Image: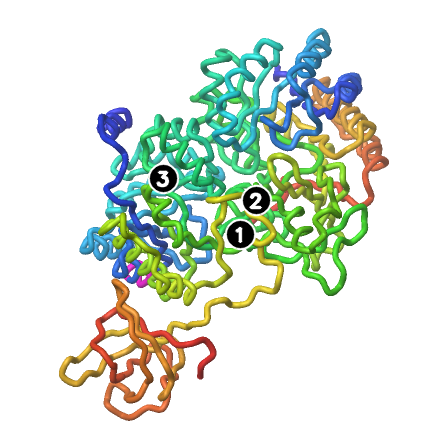
């Protein structure tokens, strides 16, 4: 099929509005992918070995992608691959083969910013959808129309667009709009920052970002310092985005895909955040009129948060209160302690794989998809062979714990940070 | 016989434009912050028309900057502005947002279009992509090395523009970051003016010799490089590589400084054109620039000879 035919087929008379918004989650590796999908993501985005902007993430081989696609398919979920670098000449070699391979292993879409990658994908891997990355900093409807005319079914808007601007874009162009709703943010226009290149010779637009915007700087005017010794220093570091309180507005403005940031984040983070947004979206569609924000959702989000949260550019341009001038403390008061592998109805014991130290007498929480949740104290604990244990000290050790209520494989166990 | 390369300058005023023309500039990028990004000065449409009148008789070209990151609110005025630029007789429009390309196709058909998205113009496939959609020139990112520049020129029919001198933008945010910081310090009125003339810069604890200018305008907060690119010693390498346009970025520099720099590059280019085979770099060209260079800002090769990782 030619690109033109593909375009026609995709756009003829078809309204590009999904029935309900897609919840799109990051997955830094295969295990995270499985948790994101199990906890309710409609789609996940991952990075491959090349062309992605997280060169430090552990990234997927084609074999792992295939397994991820098969796992996701069982839940009716899709897998996207971020190919969102701005390529240099030497990256062009091998691009065709890489994109064909993505198509072959069943990837549904790539997320791309560089026209070199967009065009190559359309030519050599026509079954791959191409979604325009936020790295293109698309802010206006005319530009969105341009990308639609170029055959792209979806645009991820710049993180600088407000509710009002999104509404305007949706009014003018019939196309899927994806927006970041949760997670860390570039404080610059995405892609318009080469601080890492200048400070550390690492190419930020090819995955080398070293987060220089979060460093502290001395600010001067005419060689006079604009701070005193005891004052906070200048920085560009932003608080993290969290739109859980504005879900109805996001749905009503017509955002088609709700994107969570964080391919470098933990399983606990991804599963917790996905779990909350899944419940909130489902609750809204079950009864839009009666929808109310549940305080427990906000509490759950805060248990995984790495930084203070805000609403980005959705309501207004961020100001002083939206940046982090103080020393960054770990905001999340909870740690991932273990993951449930099995549960025995007869004995009431679960087998938990250790992910962080915990011990007898410690208060823990069990969390599962659809908001299942309970707290308990660790009262009985043995190793796999039944030998009593005082503490779970070894990473990935399998431990039997009596649980207060039935649990399921892939439920998570967490504990308060620092509680030893 | 190669096309004569172009020495491209910026100007903060009509007066600077005249002086830099006299110093040897072949072309200028000018415009206003409403449409263009990080310009040396403000030229409204009347001044642009005036600039064209000054430049045309001397064979000097005027390019209008429209390479902002654009929001919906600007779209309505694009067609009128582009038509006015066309009417004023500008030689090209510099764009970075596809919205400008779409409007130019309709309101200024035949107008030369320069693709300039700054740090994201990084390869020849993308150059040719924009070429097929109407761009006549590809402005390369400053973060590329000599080899990447040469490989791009040999793989595209488009004119290639490279910045050879001056400061570069290294960070651009829509946020008011200096203003927010002053609010955080509870001194919101301490710096009523945060523009590029204000002399604001930041320093990082482990790089105490580097001063990174920072300023705000209607497009947000901009942080600039602590050094100035200076490629005059290696100009012939760029010319041999087939680079057509050599840009001197004059933002945040005095007219006298820019005049000296333009003169030096003019001499180097003319010497090269006159006899490419026998061309020899003259130390005095560089010395003239060094004599006017701010001692707090190093002259560097930018990324031309750097190895980057990721």
* Image quadrant in which you'd find residue A327: bottom right
User: What SS does tag 1 mark?
Assistant: loop
* Image quadrant in which you'd find residue B48: top right
Q: x%, y% of residue B243?
A: 60, 26
User: How many angstroms separate mark 3 from mark 1 (CA)?
Assistant: 32 Å
Q: Chain of mark 1?
A: A
Q: Residues within 10 Å of mark 3 (few under 14, many from 20)?
A: some
Question: Which dot marks residue A193?
Answer: 2
Q: Chain of mark 3?
A: A
Disc on the earlier residue, 3 or 2: 2
Question: Which dot marks residue A253?
Answer: 3
> Residue placed farthest to the bottom in the image?
A388
- Main SS of the magenta part reads helix
Asked whether residue A305 is in view, the answer is yes
User: What SS does tag 2 mark?
Assistant: loop
Q: Residues within 10 Å of mark 2 (few under 14, many from 20)?
A: many
Query: Which portion, as a residue range, is magenta?
Result: A30-34
Q: x%, y% of residue B110?
A: 50, 11
Of residues B140 and B213, the one drawn nearer to the viewer in this rendering: B213
> Residue placed farthest to the top in the image?
B57
Q: x%, y% of residue A14?
A: 23, 30
Q: Residues within 10 Å of mark 1 (few under 14, many from 20)?
A: many
Residue indicated by mark 1: A209
């Amino acid at each position: 099929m030619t690109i033109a035919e593909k375009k026609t087929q995709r756009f003829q008379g078809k309204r590009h509005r999904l029935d309900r918004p897609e919840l799109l989650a990051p997955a830094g590796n295969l295990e995270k992918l499985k948790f994101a999908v199990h906890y309710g993501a409609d789609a996940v985005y991952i990075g491959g070995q090349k062309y992605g902007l997280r060169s430090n993430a552990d990234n997927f081989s084609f074999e792992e992608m295939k397994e991820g696609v098969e796992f996701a398919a069982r839940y009716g979920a899709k897998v996207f691959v971020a190919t969102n670098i701005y390529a240099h000449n030497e990256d062009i070699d091998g691009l065709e083969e890489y994109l064909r391979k993505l198509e072959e292993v069943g990837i549904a879409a790539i997320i791309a910013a560089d026209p070199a990658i967009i065009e190559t994908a359309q030519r050599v891997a026509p079954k791959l959808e191409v979604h325009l990355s936020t790295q293109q900093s698309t802010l206006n409807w005319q530009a969105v129309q341009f990308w639609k005319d170029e055959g792209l079914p979806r645009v991820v808007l710049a993180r600088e667009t407000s509710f009002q601007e999104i509404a305007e874009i949706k009014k003018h162009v019939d196309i899927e709009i994806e927006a970041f709703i949760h997670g860390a943010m570039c404080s610059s226009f995405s892609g318009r920052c080469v601080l890492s290149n200048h400070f550390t010779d690492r190419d930020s637009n090819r995955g080398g970002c070293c987060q220089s915007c979060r460093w502290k700087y001395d600010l001067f005017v005419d060689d006079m310092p604009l701070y005193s010794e005891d004052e906070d220093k200048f920085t560009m570091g932003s608080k993290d985005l969290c739109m859980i309180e504005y879900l109805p507005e996001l749905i009503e403005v017509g955002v088609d895909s709700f994107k969570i940031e964080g391919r470098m984040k933990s399983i606990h983070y991804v599963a917790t955040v996905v779990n909350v947004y899944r419940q909130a979206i489902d609750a809204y569609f079950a009864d839009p009129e009666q929808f109310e924000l549940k305080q427990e959702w906000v509490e759950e989000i805060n248990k995984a948060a790495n930084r203070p949260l805000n609403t980005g550019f959705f309501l207004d341009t961020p100001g002083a209160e939206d940046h982090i001038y103080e020393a960054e403390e770990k905001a999340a008061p909870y740690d991932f302690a273990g993951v449930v592998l099995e549960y025995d109805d007869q004995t009431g014991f679960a087998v938990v794989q250790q992910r962080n130290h915990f011990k007898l007498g410690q208060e823990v929480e069990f969390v599962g998809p659809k908001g299942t949740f309970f707290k308990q104290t660790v009262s009985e604990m043995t190793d796999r062979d039944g030998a009593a244990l005082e503490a779970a000290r070894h990473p990935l050790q399998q431990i039997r714990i009596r649980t207060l209520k039935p649990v399921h494989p892939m439920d998570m166990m967490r504990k308060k940070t620092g509680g030893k | 016989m190669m096309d004569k390369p172009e020495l491209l300058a910026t100007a903060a005023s009509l007066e600077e434009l005249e002086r830099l023309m006299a110093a040897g500039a072949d072309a200028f990028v000018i415009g206003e912050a409403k449409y263009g990004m990080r310009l040396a000065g403000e030229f409204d449409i009347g001044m642009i028309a005036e600039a064209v009148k000054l430049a045309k008789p001397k064979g000097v070209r005027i390019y209008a900057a429209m390479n902002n990151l654009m929001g919906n609110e600007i779209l309505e005025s694009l067609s009128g502005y582009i038509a006015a630029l066309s009417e004023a007789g500008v030689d090209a429009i510099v764009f970075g947002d596809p919205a400008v390309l779409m409007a130019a196709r309709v309101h200024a058909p035949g107008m030369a279009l320069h693709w300039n998205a700054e740090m994201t113009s990084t390869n020849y496939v993308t150059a040719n992509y924009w070429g097929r959609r109407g761009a006549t020139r590809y402005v390369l990112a400053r973060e590329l090395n000599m080899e990447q520049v040469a490989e791009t020129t040999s793989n595209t029919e488009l004119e290639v523009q490279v910045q050879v001198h001056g400061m570069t933008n290294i960070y651009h945010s829509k946020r008011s970051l200096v203003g927010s910081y002053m609010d955080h310090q509870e001194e919101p009125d301490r710096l009523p003016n945060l523009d590029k003339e204000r002399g604001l810069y930041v320093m990082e604890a482990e790089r105490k010799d580097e001063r990174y200018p920072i300023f705000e305008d209607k497009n947000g907060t901009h942080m600039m490089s602590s050094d100035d690119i200076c490629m005059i010693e290696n100009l012939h390498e760029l010319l041999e590589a087939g680079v057509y346009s050599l840009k001197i970025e004059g933002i945040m520099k005095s007219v006298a400084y820019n005049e000296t720099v333009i003169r030096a590059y003019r001499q180097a280019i003319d010497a090269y054109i006159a006899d490419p085979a026998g061309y020899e770099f003259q130390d005095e060209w560089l010395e003239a620039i060094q004599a006017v260079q701010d001692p707090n800002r190093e002259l560097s090769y930018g990324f031309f000879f750097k190895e980057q990782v990721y």
